[in-house]
Amino acid sequence: PVAISELYRPFDSLVHGLLLVVAIIYLGTGGVVYWLRPERSGAWALLLFCSTLAVQLAVTLHTDYIEGAIVHLVVNPPLIGATTFHLFTTYPIQPGWVVRHPRIQVFPYLGAGLLVALALAEGRLGLPPGIASELGFLYMAVLVWLSLGILAVERRRHRIDYAGSLLLT
């Protein structure tokens, strides 16, 4: 047995409290934007993104004391990746290839679903412990970087198109 004084540190509680405040701000922001503009796909994408980040922030510390926190920490990263891709291929600029093929935004969610299933069945499948969480983190990282790259390319293309239209007028 470990003494509670070795596990509990007031600074950790302060950080966890601040993370909860930030999580509530994320949820509030996503909720308000969706409430004000429910017809916009960007508002829905922002709500999903803010929700997954809020969950991650809320369960990051004190996982020993939060029921199901470990499951959320393993399941949530692939969903963060999928919602990031969804958000940055919807708002602020929707790429032409997404406009032509809007169902492409579903594929990251399907990949996340497979990784979630793998994470939940990892022990029963006889996989090395932690492999599903590592794959989930890698999936999230790849999708986040890909999403930021798509956003950068589209912003640059939009600026070039805008500047070209100004020159023609």
Image (cartoon, grey):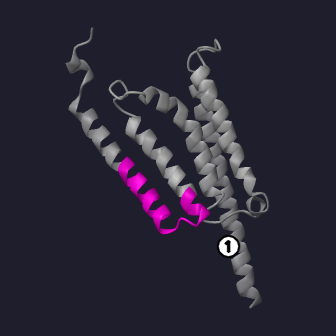
Q: Position of residue 93 (x, y in %)?
A: 65, 66
Q: Secondary structure at mark 1?
A: helix
Q: Is residue 49 above or below residue 12?
A: below
What range of the chain is rendered magenta? 23-44
Nearer to us in this view, 102 or 141: 102
**Mark 1 packing: few (<14 Cα in 10 Å), some, or many (20+)?**
few
Left or right: 159 in relation to 58: right
Left or right: 146 in relation to 1: right
* Magenta-drawn stretch, dominant element (helix, strand or loop): helix
Query: In the rendered structure, does residue 158 fall within the stretch colored magenta?
Result: no
Residue 135 seen by the camera = no
How many circles with numbers are drawn on the protein? 1
The residue that appears at 22% across and 18% down in the rendered structure is 4
Nearer to us in this view, 23 or 169: 23
Q: Is the N terminus in the top left, top right, bottom left or bottom right quadrant? A: top left
Query: In the rendered structure, does residue 31 fall within the stretch colored magenta?
Result: yes
The residue that appears at 79% across and 62% down in the rendered structure is 100
Left or right: 66 in relation to 70: left
Q: Position of residue 127 (x, y in %)?
A: 64, 15
The residue that appears at 59% across and 27% down in the rendered structure is 134
Q: Is the C terminus in the top left, top right, bottom left or bottom right quadrant? A: bottom right
Q: Is residue 160 above or below residue 28?
A: below
